[in-house]
Amino acid sequence: MMDLLEVLHLDELSHGLAKLSMFPYFDMAHYIMSVLALREQPGALEVSRVSPFACWFSSMLFCFGGAVLSGIMLAEPPVAPLSNSTSVLLASIIWYLVFYCPMDLVYSSITFLPLRLVLSGMKEVTRTWKVLSGVTQAHSKYKDSLLVMIAIGWTRGAGGGLIRNFEQLVRGVWKPETNELLKMSYPTKITLIGAVLFALQQTHYLPLQTRHLMLIYTIFTVVNKSRMMLTGSSSSPFAAIESAIYRTLFAGYSPYAALTGEATKACADVSASVATKESSKNRAADAPSPSPVMGQTLKAKEESERPEPESCKKMD
């Protein structure tokens, strides 16, 4: 891998990415895209007119949710991310301009596609740094716990989505069906994949240098995000792999599925026959019938009281 990067002249680029400072420009892009995502939520603009404080608090959760959630998981003060007054002030200014700028000039400028592409790419760069910082922080405290490193890296990079239900509750909305664990969005999925990769790299299961993995992961996320925005597609590039894994491991398919289906159909036919005979018996009991019909009714009763086949009992 090292030789390939040198041939492509990407080793110097990986060094530059590793030394890149996120403040202020990349952090600003992260705040802009986070507040923009909040404004595009249904009902968020109405809440901003009714309760500016609730809107501001929701914006801070979007901007700093990953750091807050990972701090809670590591038993650290959840308000620690808000102790950086400069970052909070910068995020608050962006929140005000996006929601309350006269004539919506800032919002209209941000939604201009070329500018939005640049800001989205910069936000993906900050995602790489957030995931890596979460993994390294967990690695410094729990060196042998791969699961903890993945969890902290995941929450640090996608915390805004993982605490979406709480953020919605702040705005007076309760939609538990939007839980990210029930149906993951693309940012949550790609962050989880990054957390797994960086955790494997930190524990030396993945033979790559940190800066090289940062470069590869960043290029993939930026290119794929740009592709999704340009094509207007929201489908995950991992959809085919996810479908194959689900069908193989979690759909409950087995070599005996056909036999099971036939047995189930047979049991259903028996149940339907029993129900029909019970209905005939009830109608015969309600209305007087000639003696031949009474004989048929008794015969139907005897047949309805017959036990179900053993195979049906086993299926139940």
Image: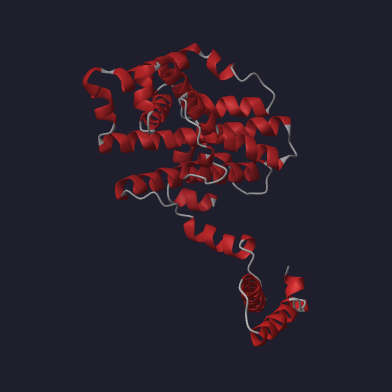
Can residue 212 be seen here? The reply is: no
Say which of 240 and 310 sits in front: 310
Q: Residue 208 in the image: x percent, y percent?
A: 59, 47
Say which of 24 and 273 sits in front: 273
The structure residue drawn at horizontal position 63% and vertical position 60%, both measured from the top left corner, is: 250
Q: Quadrant of the C terminus?
A: bottom right
Say which of 130 and 201 sits in front: 130
Horizontal side of residue 37 vs 308, given as left or right: left
**Occupied quadrant, residue 141:** top right
The structure residue drawn at horizontal position 69% and vertical position 37%, both measured from the top left corner, is: 148
In the picture as drawn, the residue positioned furthest to the bottom comes out as 292
Rendered view: 86 above or below 252: above
**Occupied quadrant, residue 39:** top left
In the picture as drawn, the residue positioned furthest to the left comes out as 103
Horizontal side of residue 141 vs 5, given as left or right: right
Horizontal side of residue 113 vs 289, given as left or right: left
Q: Residue 166 in the image: x percent, y percent?
A: 54, 28
Can residue 294 be seen here? The reply is: yes
Q: Residue 131 in the image: x percent, y percent?
A: 56, 36
